[in-house]
């Protein structure tokens, strides 16, 4: 699976890479459920943010969400709090899906983030909490 992640990151860096193939590869990695990839996914997501690559943020965020579930919420919210000028529809959907699929764990993970030193992260945590059932 590591080889697939390497291939995905190479494709995300290649402006000429086939979009459909890149998405299919991201989906394949996400479907693997390989938790061993989480540290590397986090590092690649951080790199995408540093490079201001909204496309990579969306795809890597989706893979991280699929594999990490509610435990990935802090990383996803931190990634979402960075304004890259895009609409973040896919990343927002991933966050909402996690929150609604596991409300108890999500509340436990999100609540402390509402007091994060980074106000953008705190605001995203407050936003995500609004999607809890019966919130």
Image (spheres, helix red, strand yellow):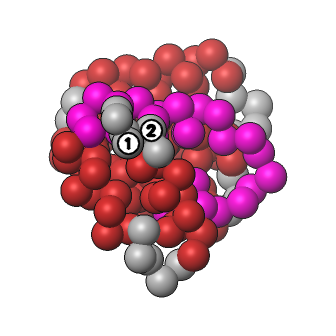
Provide residue 4's location: percent of width, then percent of height: 38, 32
Residue 102 lies within the magenta run? yes
How far apart in space, not on screen, are marks 1 and 2 (Cα)? 7 Å
Q: Residue furthest right?
A: 85
Q: Nearer the viewer, residue 70 or 23?
A: 70
Can residue 7 be seen?
no
Secondary-structure class at tag 1: loop
Q: Which residue is mark 2?
A: 131
Q: Residue 91's x, y, as percent?
A: 55, 39
Of residues 91 and 116, the one nearer the viewer is 116
Residue 121 percent location from the top left of the image? 52, 67
Side of 7 relative to 110 (left or right): right
73 lies above or below 32: below
Q: Position of residue 10 (x, y in %)?
A: 56, 42
Q: Which residues are magenta?
A: 78-103
Residue contact between numbered discs 1 and 2, judged by CB atoms under 8 Å: yes
As helix, strand or loop, the secondary structure at mark 2 comes to: loop
Q: Quadrant of residue 82?
A: bottom right
Secondary structure that dominates the magenta span: helix
* Residue sitting at x 72%, y 60%: 83
């Amino acid at each position: 699976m590591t080889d697939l992640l390497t291939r995905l990151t190479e494709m995300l860096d290649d402006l000429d890479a086939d979009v459909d193939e890149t998405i299919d590869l991201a989906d394949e990695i996400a479907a693997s459920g390989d938790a061993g990839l989480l540290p590397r996914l986090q590092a690649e997501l951080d790199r995408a943010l540093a490079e201001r690559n909204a496309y990579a943020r969306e795809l890597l965020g989706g893979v991280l969400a699929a594999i990490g579930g509610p435990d990935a919420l802090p990383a996803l919210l931190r990634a979402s709090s960075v304004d890259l000028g895009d609409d973040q529809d896919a990343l927002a959907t991933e966050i909402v899906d996690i929150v609604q699929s596991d409300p108890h764990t999500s509340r436990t993970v999100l609540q402390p983030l509402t007091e994060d030193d980074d106000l953008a992260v705190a605001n995203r945590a407050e936003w995500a909490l609004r999607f809890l059932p019966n919130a």
